[in-house]
Image (spheres, rainbow, N blue to C red):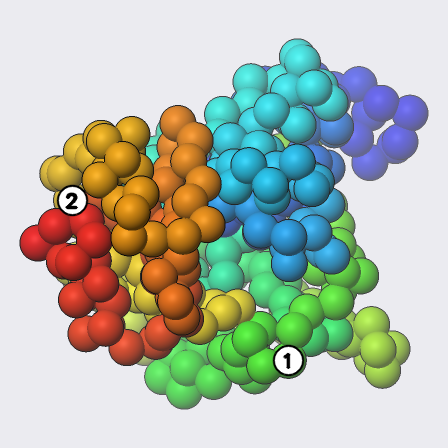
Amino acid sequence: MLFAGIGEEGQQRLLASQAVIVGCGAIGAAAAGLLVRAGVGRVRIIDRDFVEPSNLQRQTLFDEDDARSALPKAIAAERKLRAINGSVAVEGLLADVGPRNVEELLAGFDLILDGTDNFETRFLINDYAVQSARPWIYAAAVASYGVTMTIRPGRTACLACLLEPSRNGHGLEETCDTVGVLGPIVNLIASLEVAEALKFLAGREEALQGRLISCDVWSGRFQSVRVAQNPTCRACSRREFSYLHGQAQPHITLCGRDSVQIHERGRTLDLRALRERLAATVSDVRHNEFLLCFRVDPYQMTVFADGRAILKGTKDPSVARSLYARFIGA
Ligand SMILES: [Zn+2]
């Protein structure tokens, strides 16, 4: 409230505002912490994955206990954030945002923040945001480099203006697999993203950057570029929302590791029964109310109660499919 840019009125607006973060990895977790501490009234966090020891180098909301118990990130984040600021309505959802549920998961929020690790989901968010005239903030980082841009449909360029048709992703489609990602860059990008979010939610839209900001914490290079709207943009000009209308891929390769995700809809698994059935054939079994995780060398398989599964150790969908059929059922 003491800060002139926000003031008492801005803080009141923050308290009455609602933000949703898609993805709770490094950027999403850092952004969620900042929003909840700032007193944004309602914060929803959506993530499809669980905490692993290798996340802890940069994912500041999580700890070794979360990794040991293989807690879903959305659940671990909700618990931490509620402990940080009990007056914020924090809601963690274990879900994978896709064309079928994007409307249901994102509708009704003032602002959408990018915490994802892949362009498939970012283009889906962009399609949804442009179609429903809702602002969102793009944010991404890999190695020591990151970018962010606030997208206000109709007033600024959108993600498709920026990246299609070249889809070059500013080199950000390089995998975190091979090049890793530094803790400082994700926290810096999350900070820039949340500064924009606070301006918007506090009703200070005139202060928004409207520019693509990129930085590299290793070389020290910082850039800000005005991005023009593309008059023939697929999304914001021609209004062809191909990601919204597309069917979700049955298999998606996740960023950051050698893994494949399998979607099984309309299926409910009894994880306890599955654990008993598999006990003799698999190793390193971990189980909580949200998921069952086990090893079948050289693979690691994680199955969620809704039938979704993540297979680590392969990028081959047919291998993933056959393992799924063998251990979970066809
Ligand atoms: Zn556009």
* Circle number at residue 265: 2
Q: Residue at x 80, y 61 (%)?
A: 184
Q: Indicate the position of residue 57 as horizontal and vertical percent values.
A: 74, 57
Label 2 SS: loop
Identify the image quadrant of residue 220.
Answer: bottom right
Q: Residue at x 25, y 67 (%)?
A: 320
Q: Indicate the position of residue 60 as horizontal and vertical percent values.
A: 72, 45
What's the residue type where badge 1 is placed?
Val
Identify the image quadrant of residue 246.
Answer: bottom left
Q: Does residue 60 appear left or right of residue 155 in this picture?
A: right
Quick check: 92 above or below 212? above
Furthest residue in direction right, as rendered: 2
Q: Residue at x 49, y 69 (%)?
A: 257
Q: Total number of numbered labels?
A: 2
Q: Can residue 324 be seen by looking at this rendering?
A: yes
User: If the image is split into quadrants, where does the C terminus sit?
Assistant: bottom left
- Mark 1 lies on residue: 179
What's the residue type where badge 2 is placed?
Arg
Report the front residue among 44 and 272: 272
Q: Indicate the position of residue 250 as horizontal and vertical percent values.
A: 19, 62
Furthest residue in direction left, as rendered: 330
